[in-house]
Image (cartoon, rainbow, N blue to C red):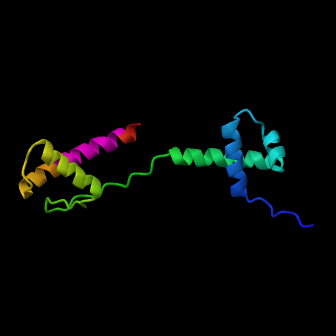
């Protein structure tokens, strides 16, 4: 009779995570007994889980700002959040959709986004 295939480290870590979420007081030895592995393997898994959790909480690095072109113009990529911000700014001020109003709304959106990212960086 053949033995079942060995459990991969990823599967074992998932099971370890589930066990400690269910009962945080379980020792590494007791978890190892339940999963059929040694306590040292469980300790390695717990450390890997801690590192994964810490990495998930770390905010992504902010790219260095690029210098503005010398001609005084700035090119913006109108992604969906920026489009929504421009529409909200125009709508809340009951302003028409024309280039002058779009420039004013874009400036407001840039300032609002800058404030948002500054707050995120502080926390």
- Please provide percent x and percent y for residue 118: 33, 41
Could you tell me which residue is drawn at 68 percent across and 44 percent down? Answer: 18
View extreme (top): residue: 25
Q: Please identify the quadrant where the N terminus is shown.
A: bottom right
Q: Please identify the quadrant where the C terminus is shown.
A: top left
- Please provide percent x and percent y for residue 65: 31, 54
Q: Is residue 110 magenta?
A: yes
Could you tell me which residue is drawn at 71 percent across and 46 percent down? Answer: 16
- Please provide percent x and percent y for residue 90: 13, 48
Could you tell me which residue is drawn at 60 percent across and 49 percent down? Answer: 52
Residue closer to the observer: 22 or 82: 22
Span colored in magenta: 107-119
View extreme (front): residue: 1
The quadrant holding residue 120 is: top left
- Tell me: 10 left or right of 102: right
Q: Main secondary structure of the magenta part?
A: helix
- Please provide percent x and percent y for residue 97: 9, 55
Q: Is residue 7 magenta?
A: no
Residue closer to the observer: 1 or 74: 1
Could you tell me which residue is drawn at 73 percent across and 53 percent down? Answer: 12
């Amino acid at each position: 009779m053949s033995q079942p295939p060995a459990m991969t480290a990823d599967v074992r870590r998932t099971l370890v995570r589930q066990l400690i979420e269910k009962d945080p007081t379980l020792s590494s030895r007791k978890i190892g007994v339940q999963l059929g592995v040694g306590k040292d393997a469980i300790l390695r898994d717990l450390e890997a889980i801690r590192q994964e959790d810490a990495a998930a909480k770390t905010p992504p690095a902010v790219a260095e700002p690029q210098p503005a072109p010398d001609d005084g113009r700035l090119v913006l990529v109108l992604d969906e959040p920026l489009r929504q911000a421009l529409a909200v700014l125009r709508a809340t001020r009951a302003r028409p959709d024309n280039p002058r109003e779009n420039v004013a709304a874009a400036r407001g959106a840039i300032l609002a986004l800058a404030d948002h990212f500054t707050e995120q960086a502080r926390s």
